[in-house]
Structure formats: structure tokens, C-alpha cells
Image (spheres, rainbow, N blue to C red):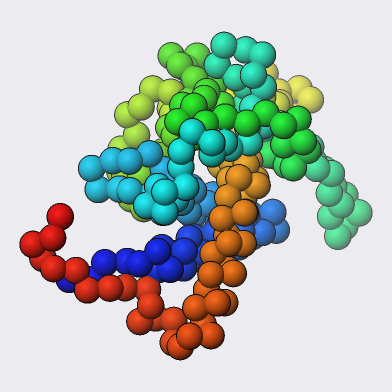
Amino acid sequence: MLKRTRLGLQYSLLVQYDALRLSAAMYDAGHRNEAVRLANAIFVLLGPDMRNHNSILRQLGAIDESFLLPSSADSRGPHGSAPIAAQLYAYTAGDGGGGYTIECAPFGHEPLSAGRRLPVAEWWSEGVLSGIGAPKTLSRLEVVRIMRDQDGGAHLDDHIKDETYLAVYLKGTGFLYKPSADSEVSLPVEGALEATVRQMAYEVDRGVRGFALSAQAALAEAASKGPLYPQYFEMESATST
């Protein structure tokens, strides 16, 4: 059978890193549904080990005690706080009228300059998103698994049972608005999960960029030796351990 070589893993790293950056650019251009693909790329790059999953960076031996990821969550609270905000946009219609739209938005690059960095396991488990009336705060891993395993990144569940997810989805995360001045009800601002995943993409991009640059250099060197694809795999005996 075939086993991926280190060069093959570096190539796979670049595939997922490019997917992360492309989906992030599309998200920023207004395609908010790219969040499910961002979640999948983040998980494949450095998701925790599971029965059927071993992340690319783990296979490359890159995740150790010295590898830290930037965190743009607020560390002052016991569970952190959502690294997102509600943003108001004004628009003008063709007939001269107009109005406003409001949605959740990631904080972007600026919070990363604070220099707060965490070991990978702590980064995944840090609380980043709370729903109104939710029994707990969602960690980064829970946000990614919701987007990846329930909302279509890799799987799509036909029923949503998790109480915290339901609280985020139905009641909001603390960002509420009135659809009109005389409205008696307040509605949750949409897009909190998606904006949180986009902010995570800022963190992951910053954290793994050095590995991506090293992978690019390794592939460029390997290309001078011959076709790349045969160098991505090596034969391994079915009885080897």
C-alpha cells in the first residue's frame, strides 16, 4: 500500500492552507456560507486526534509544546468572549430610499497584535461563543464541529438537538436588534457561528503560515529533481507497523 511521504504531507498542507485562504477571501467578499468550508480546512489542518482523524500538522510532527496559536478571544473572563461584533451597514436603494442591515462580523487582524498565544489543545478548548440562555459557552472545537459535522462542512444533520447550538441559532449571542422603531420584539443578529469561524481562520492563517512557506520551499526544491506526484507517496508493506 501507499504511504504519504513528508513531501506528500507538505503538499496536503498547502492544499488545505490554500483552501483556507480562498474561502476566507470569498467570505470577506460576502459569501458567508464559505464558513463551513473554513471549518473543514481548519479541522483537517490541526484538529484534535480522533478515531478516524490525524491532522496534517500532527502527522508532520509540528504540533508540540512550542507550537502556539494566536487567540483573539478576550481572556479576562472565565471562558473568554466571542471574538466577533455586531456591525451595522447602511445602504441606498435605486429609488432613493434605503435602510440598514446588521450582521455579526469577525474582529479581523487587529486583535492578533495583542500577542496572546495558546498551546493547540488550550486554543481548541477555549470558550468563544455563548448563546442567550445557553447552558454553556461553545469552545472553538464545538463551533467547528457544528459547522463541519452538522451544518454541511463534511456532514449535514437533519435534526439539531444540542441546547447550546439551539440557543445561539434561535436566541442569538447577546446581539439583538428591533426590526423597526415601534417593534415589540427583538431579533438575534445572524451569523455569529460563521463570523466566529472566520475569526478562527485569521488565527490559524497567522499560526501556520510559516509551515506553509516551508512547504512551498520544499516542493520547489523537489520539483528540480523530477515530477512531484511520484514523490508524494512511498510503498509500504501491508505487514509493517
- Residue 151 visible (yes or no): no
Residue positioned most to the left:
239
Residue 202 position, x and y percent, is 65, 45
Residue 167 or 219: which is nearer the viewer? 219
Image-quadrant location for residue 80? top right
Name the quarter where the C terminus is drawn: bottom left
Q: Residue at x 50, y 14 (%)?
A: 133
Q: Is residue 7 left or right of residue 73?
A: left
Residue 27 position, x and y percent, is 63, 54
Q: Residue at x 76, y 30 (%)?
A: 114
In this rendering, the answer to whether 26 lies above or below 40 is: below
Name the quarter where the N terminus is drawn: bottom left
Q: Residue at x 84, y 49 (%)?
A: 91
Residue 9 or 21: which is nearer the viewer? 9
- Residue 197 visible (yes or no): yes
Residue 98 position, x and y percent, is 85, 47
Residue 26 position, x and y percent, is 64, 60
In this rendering, the answer to whether 97 lies above or below 160 is: below
Q: Is residue 73 left or right of residue 96?
A: left
In this rendering, the answer to whether 163 lies above or below 60 is: above
Residue positioned most to the bottom:
226
